[in-house]
Amino acid sequence: MKNIIWLALLAVAATLEAGGDALARTGLHSQAMLIRVGAFLAAALVLFAYGVTVNLPPWDFGRLLGVYVALFFMVAQLINYFAFGMAPSPPVLAGGALIISGGLLMTFWTARGF
């Protein structure tokens, strides 16, 4: 059960990181200076919150970031689709399936089995 809670927390971290990246992208491509500065400031705050959140689970660093990468992939694809209108291509979906499989293994496979 604790793994599910840590997984949810990592999903929040992935949302913060992908959201912060999207804000930075918005700032980079905006022509209006006020929007540009606002997007950069918001991105900095959101990315700081991500940095704190991603490190809260008590897992070893390798496992933590391995699981996190799978969650980040999923959140990034959702943001890419809903915010930027880009659907993932078949190669991205196939590679993503492998990434997600690895994340699930690292989350739920213990020395005692699943």
Image: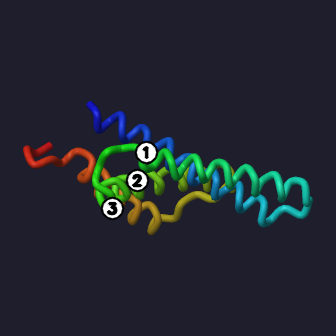
Crowding near the residue tagged with mark 3, few <14, some 14–19, many ≥20 C-alpha atoms within 10 Å? few
- The amino acid at mark 2 is Tyr
Q: Amino acid at mark 3?
A: Leu
Say which label, 2 or 1, has the lower sequence index: 1
Marks 2 and 3: which is nearer the front?
A: 2
Quick check: 13 above or below 92? above
Q: List the residue tagged with mark 2.
A: 68
- Assign a secondary structure to mark 3: helix
Mark linked to residue 108: none
Q: Are marks 2 and 1 in contact (CB under 8 Å)?
A: yes
Dot 1, crowdedness within 10 Å: few (<14), some or many (≥20)? many
Q: In the rendered structure, which amino acid carries the disc numbered 1?
A: Leu
Compute the Cα span from label 2 to label 1: 6 Å
When asked about the image quadrant of residue 18, the answer is bottom right
Mark drawn on residue 98: 3
Question: Relative to residue 17, is residue 32 drawn left or right?
Answer: right
Q: Position of residue 4 (x, y in %)?
A: 32, 35
Q: In x, y percent, where is residue 68?
A: 40, 53
Circle 1 SS class: helix
Alpha-carbon span between mark 2 and mark 3: 14 Å
- In the rendered image, the residue lying farthest to the bottom is 91
Camera-side residue: 30 or 55? 55
Residue at coordinates 78% horizontally, 60% vertically from top-left?
A: 27
**Toward which corner of the image does residue 36 lie, by quadrant?**
bottom right
Left or right of 92, for residue 61: left
Foreground mark, 1 or 3, reads 1
Residue for badge 1: 10
For this orientation, the residue located farthest to the left is 112
Note whether 107 is above or below 36 in the view shown: above
Q: Who is closer to the viewer here, 61 or 7?
A: 61
The N terminus lies in quadrant: top left
